[in-house]
Amino acid sequence: MFTVHRYQTFPTVPEALAPLTAIARNLWWTWNPRARHLFARIDAELYDRVAHNPLALLKRASQRRLDELAKDESYLRALAEIERCQSDYLHRPSWFEEKYGKESESLGRIAYFSMEFGIHECLPVYSGGLGVLAGDHLKSASDLGLPLVGVGLAFSQGYFRQSLDIEGWQNERYPPNDWHDLPVFPVNDADGKRIEVAVTLPRAGGRREVKIQAWRADVGRVPLYLLDADFEANAPEDRALTNTLYGGDRAHRICQEILLGVGGVRLLEALGVLVSVCHMNEGHSAFLALERVRQIMTAHGASFVVATEVASAGNVFTTHTPVPAGNDAFAHDLAKPYLEVLGEPLGMSGEQIARIGRVEPEREGTEFSMPVLAIRMADRYNGVSMLHGREARAMWNVLWPGLAVDEVPIGAITNGVHVPTWLDGELSELYARHLGDDFLERSTDPATWAKIMAIPDEELWSAHARRKERMVAAIRARLRSGDRKGPAEDPSRIDRLLDPNALTIGFARRFATYKRGTLLLRDPERLRRILSQSQRPVQLVFSGKAHPQDWGGKELIREIVRASTNDAFRGRVVFVEDYDMGVARALVAGVDVWLNTPRRPLEASGTSGMKAGLNGALNASILDGWWVEGYSGDNGFAIGRGEEYADAGQGDNVEAQALYRLLEEDIVPLYYERDAQGLPRAWLARMKRSIASIAPAFNTTRMVREYVETYYAPGLRRHRQMVEGDLSAARSLCDWKARVREAWGAVRVESVSQKGPTRVPSGQPLGVVCEVSLGTLSPADVAVELYYGRAAVGGTLERGATAPMRSVADLGGGKHRFEGEIPTDESGDHAFGVRVIPHHAALPNRFAAQLVRWH
């Protein structure tokens, strides 16, 4: 036997094709269909095999093919055009510069922290909706020219790859990421040496330093820094800290979150990136708030309290779920050693840090919540749909004791999707012909999208039919390459799976029990009748992953796979393995109906239905998340009327029956109602209304602009105000807060009386007088308010509103008289209360002092 000596060969990219490498290194190509087509022309089959990674494609392509393209005039012209388009995009004037002018130069930068980023399937550091939303956020930030950077983790194995056994049980694989093969590059200093930062973690009997390097991915004009601990300077157990997304035990998770939050802020400092606002996308990165405080204390010699005031001015927190499992919290005993390490450079004990992250600070030994830490260390917070904002206010009302739920200062910015990423390329060309070549630059303009209604039905239906054919071909190809071996995956059967002419319903998302992926299977016989009508066939396409520890979610997948092999459903129910962004693009562009069946109100937003709607699919959804805002009655279908059930089992039964009726009586008949030309005119009209209503409202251009105007710009300005004059404004505000807290025990409403009778003619204001003891405080330190509304059961108010009371007399001894009026526009039974809250012009919101005194 002879000795085998290994070697590698790789092609040389001809000089004429050199721009391909530069284009590939900026992820701008992921949302430019012509750029993607340019890479696919090199070798379409190889491009699919390397997960549409152009750098991997160029390393593996045939030298003969590259040499051939280097002489192909049409290809070189297309390459030159894409190179020009990329350059124009990267250097054109931006919306942010135009809106904020010279001020944009002094406001500072925004850092967007997220545990996952879904930019493209070739960069597998995402699991699902949270990461894809983060990726779309960066893309729109680039489009709008925001001075923003992204910070995440470079997972050496990313999220798992899914394979299903013959029984349909999910198995997880963790193939390694080769960072030298991905569209990223190492973050080096001016001398070409890797930049390193370190974080301190506890170990038995002491401390340990974990070194962090970073990789940079350019997302258009936005740099994304991915932190990496997997290199030789670290011990094996520390190298594993950036191995898998959402993997490992709870100790592993808290270490990852310290690396992300603390390590991310330190990396930006090492890079010289001056950040004024940090946006925490979920609570995973909340430890960044403590590191920002440490930096301010070090730089200015400030106290923890003053430094917290400054840091909080520039912190934004977005919560994404009302489901407890989605809100990271750590047991007290687990968190304690980590909090002691984090508190040490702040001059704080572990117990003092723990109090910041406990729902009830005084309850020692209770769990440490990352969202609570984020809320307490930020000035601005929001949910991701109007309904979710309501749920978030109810969930975290406990942090604002004394306030009605609807007054909790948690806002809402409804999610969106990045239109160029999720709009099918052929459909984009069709829209451009009818809406104008620059329609993507006017993507938030309803008038632009209203022109959809003028697209000839024949053109839209023909384009949709071709997308369905491509989707079916892609699904069959994926099933051929899958790991399952069974009758449904036999090669002779795969080509007969799915009919491009049949009504196709898609359901693809994370498989969690509350999303009810098997709701349609509750009555198999009724479903069989719906699917098997020879003249009106219906087929279901499912895809998605369950968290490796979510056994309930895995069981849902197994139930669907088993149904797909049942003779009653064979060929009509298909489960597509290993859901990723590539599969998602195919499904949202190809299905007729996008199904969404969460238990209301547990779907915070959801974005997959937005992507499908953008491509003309009709949503059939529970009225939860974004669909509450998106559904207009004629642009899709609603399952139920927005009911919420205390008994989950009863709700499942009722809504399953509602879904069957919707399919039998509305969706299936409407789809197969054809005219003499074979066109479903009523269905097409609804498709057009879906596109015209969803596209301008539910896109990330609108969403990111809202973040800028509602949170980023105010945060940038307030942070600048707090920093100026060696933190003089922050120090002054902290002194005022301390004075108010010290005096608050003496504040009380002594008496309240109405002017006139309790029965008031509608339209005549009700006058109210009260006497308030303020102790050492003055009327300028407080706001005295009337809180009024319709009287409800239990002594509460419906839709409470406020009216100010003004100080009219100093009664001596710290007592003051206040007067105010309540408008009486609506008749009926009403009630009111009087309260006192601290007031200062520099507070970020009315309730930031978190003190209130009621009569």
Image (cartoon, helix red, strand yellow):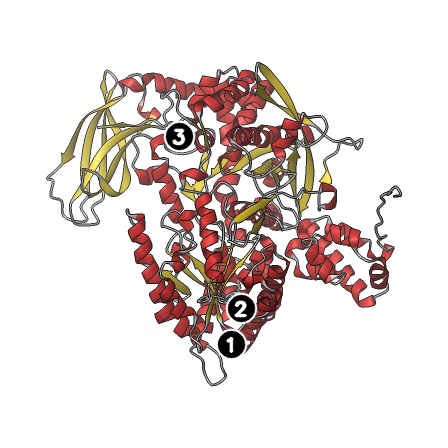
The residue wearing badge 2 is: 498
First in sequence: mark 1 vs mark 3: 1
Identified by mark 3, the residue type is Ala
Question: Mark 2 and mark 3: span between their CA atoms?
Answer: 57 Å
Q: Marks 1 and 2, how far apart in space?
A: 24 Å
Q: Is residue 729 visible?
A: no
Q: Residue at x 23, y 40 (%)?
A: 788
Q: Amino acid at mark 2?
A: Leu
Q: In the rendering, at what x and y percent does residue 277 appear? A: 55, 35
Front of the two marks 2 and 3: 2
Q: Dots 1 and 3: beta carbons under 8 Å?
A: no
The residue located at (30%, 33%) in the rendering is: 403
| Tag 1: amino acid | Asp
* Residue position for label 3: 848
Which residue position is annotated with label 1?
A: 457
Which is more N-terminal, label 3 or label 2? 2
Residue closest to the eye, 599 or 461: 599
Q: Which mark is residue 494?
A: none
Where residue 826 appears, x then y in whole percent? 20, 50
Quarter of the figure with the N terminus = top right
Front-most of 575 and 216? 575
Nearer the observer, disc 1 or disc 3?
A: 1
